[in-house]
Image (spheres, rainbow, N blue to C red):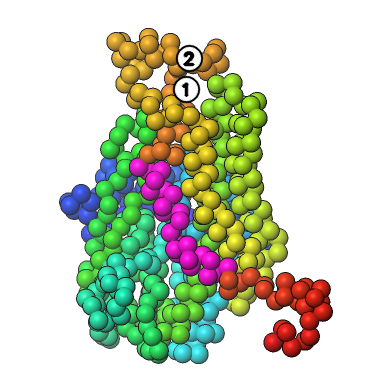
Amino acid sequence: MLMTGDQYRESLRDGREVFIDGERVASVPDHPSFRPIVDVRARIYDMAHEDGFRDVMAFEKDGEAFATAWQPPHTQDDWWAKRDWVETVMKEIGGVVTRVGDETVGEMWSLADGKDILDQVDNQWSANIDRHIDNVLKNDIFHVSANTDPKGDRSKAPQDQDPDMLLHVVRETDAGIVVRGAKYETAAAYAHQAFVKPTIANWGDAKLSDYALGFICPMNAGGLKHICRNGFAGVKPAADYPLSNGFDEVDTLLVFDNVTVPWENVLFYRHTRAASFIRGTLHRYSAYMFVLRIMHMADLMIGVALFNVRQTGLDRQQAVMEKLAQLACYREGVNAHLTGAIATAQESPGGFLMPNQSLLYTGRVLACTQLPAMMHLTRELCGGQICVTPDSPAFLSPDTRAWMEKFYNVNDDWRAEDRRKLLAFGRDLVNSDYAGHKVTFQLFAQSPPFAHLAAVYRNFDFDGPMRFVKKAAGLSDNAMR
């Protein structure tokens, strides 16, 4: 089925234990910190039912409609459809959101790609993987993933400190495994389920570890507690901080306090070889959607910067054009990697079509490492007014309104209120607490920068340049060994 927005909101009233600002949340969809982002996700669900969006948001198979975002990719057209899905969503909601499910469901496809490896160590989990991929598709499940642990003292092995620092199994029962520990997860409080997986752990030479496990967990599981950071929504006026109030994706510390995971929800368990393999291939699909979000962030930065310089008549100055060109090069560099990754896509071990891995991971490095510099370039093009402009009440008060109109009316086309809105949007995009959180999140959302480079190292074809040099330099065949 295709869920509606109201059905999604109602599905969150399921008894889950969510805490924010030290208090238990009675209803996630109605809480002021969660309501805006829940409304965004509900809007995405509703779009699939509307004539203007249905063809992009959903596809039909055997007379039933399914969300385009959840469809396992088998052709290039499947990938172009997913890209259209993301672009349509971002333009409709008027901002960039990362955790809505399409960016994490790909991790399940990576699991399916690894079934041969998993079967070599334990063949009882493969059916669970296929069933959960099917469940997300058929029931329109908002699926996220939980990866990062609190970790504790990283110089010590997990078993040499408080064992709960890394999620682990404490016992087996007839019903399933019982787990303790914690994970950080964005959007957990308003998602349906999470794929919980191991972080990069110090297993040493151990073949088996209680810390090497992956499973599906519903967000209302008994013993699961959501301890959320306080949100940006409602802290400052929406007129002055539109992105903070509309698109804050609240992060959660998920505490697993003796949570029972039914055997049918276990995807791999104890075998460190299987866990290591999954860690190494986890992002082969999901990285595409994360990097695509950054491209849309680049569009927002270009739009804000260009509006500002055109308002003030600076858009034809050489120095300004050069900075705008730098932003455009960044945006199109990311776009080129994403486009090339699909144009030269590769068949995966599980029979899916995966983006060209070398292009995808090098594109991710470009997008993430250059994002802070591009945000600073946007600040330069916006000028100092994004940090010194008075807030919206000054433009409304009888005592100050005339002065604000005098100094913020640019010409007949750009009046004070539009100028104020643009500067407020620009401030929230690159200067606010929300902006700082956003850039940090994008740098570490899937893995830290060193892991990004490790993925490039594993997937780039180094033999090609070596063969070129071997021929050009006249080296012997032994040189390639």
Image height check: is 368 above or below 170? Answer: above
Mark 1 and mark 2: Cα distance apart in space: 7 Å
Dot 1: within a 10 Å radius of its alpha carbon, few (fewer than 14), some, or many (20 or more) residues?
some
Judging from the image, what secondary structure is the residue with disc 1 in? helix
Q: Is residue 448 magenta?
A: yes
| Residue ID for mark 1 | 419
Q: Nearer the viewer, residue 115 or 10?
A: 115
Per the rendered image, the range of residues in magenta is 433-456
| Residue ID for mark 2 | 409
Image height check: is 439 above or below 244? Answer: below
- The label number, if any, that marks residue 81 in the structure image: none
Name the amino acid, label 1: Arg
Q: Quadrant of the C terminus?
A: bottom right
Q: Nearer the viewer, residue 332 or 236?
A: 332
Image height check: is 476 above or below 305? Answer: below
In the image, 172: left or right of 459?
left
Report x, y in % for residue 145: 40, 64
Determine whether label 1 and label 2 are within 8 Å by CB: yes
Report x, y in % for residue 163: 24, 77
Report x, y in % for residue 225: 24, 63
Mark positioned earlier in the residue sequence (1 or 2): 2
